[in-house]
Image: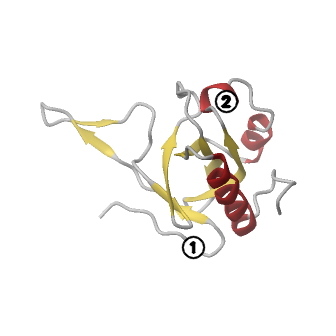
Amino acid sequence: MPGLIGSGNCVLYHGSILSISRSGRQTQKKDRVMNKVNWLSYGFDVYSPNTTWNDVPGIYIFTGLNAVGRWRAFYIGQASSFKDRFANHENWAAAVRLGATHVHALVVQQAATRDNIEAELIAACQPSLNVQLK
């Protein structure tokens, strides 16, 4: 059964999601590697970094797989617009140097809720590129 299991240090197992076309052939989803990944109790969608982002607010995590195939958080942040924030993010290049290959994103409309979720995730995961809120 495909799925992800969180561990105490915010590293998650990687799994692959395939969609079935009407002809019955399996195809990889274009922008998402899998449907959902749980970081703590929050369900994030997983995207490739070249995704065309919508103008929606939320929380994001720059992630990559470690040597044993688990997701590792390199940077956790929030945005009032994913589209505007990812146009030229100042931490993406550094995250890539550390091994980031994907962005996990969660739409969260209210700014106060984004503040709380971001702080909770940073405190629990201690991503190497986050210098505030640790």
Q: Amino acid at mark 1?
A: Ser
| Residue 67 vertical placement versus 81 (above, below) | below
- Residue 89, how many percent across, how many down? 75, 31
Q: Secondary structure at mark 2?
A: loop
Q: Secondary structure at mark 1?
A: loop
Q: Residue furthest left?
A: 23
- Residue 82, how many percent across, how many down? 61, 32
- Residue 18, how many percent across, how many down? 31, 43
Q: Residue 22's image quarter?
A: top left
- Residue 125, how many percent across, how many down? 70, 65
First in residue order: circle 2 vs circle 1: 1
| Residue 108 vertical placement versus 133 (above, below) | above
| Residue 42 vertical placement versus 75 (above, below) | below
Nearest the eye: 111 or 121: 111
- Looking at the rendered image, the quarter that the N terminus falls into is bottom left
Label 1 Cα crowd, 10 Å radius (few <14 / some 14-19 / many 20+): few
Give me the C-alpha separation between circle 2 and circle 1.
28 Å
Residue 33, labelled with which disc? none
The residue shown at (67%, 38%) is: 79
Residue 86, labelled with which disc? 2
The residue shown at (43%, 52%) is: 36
Q: Amino acid at mark 2?
A: Phe
Q: Which residue is mark 1?
A: 7
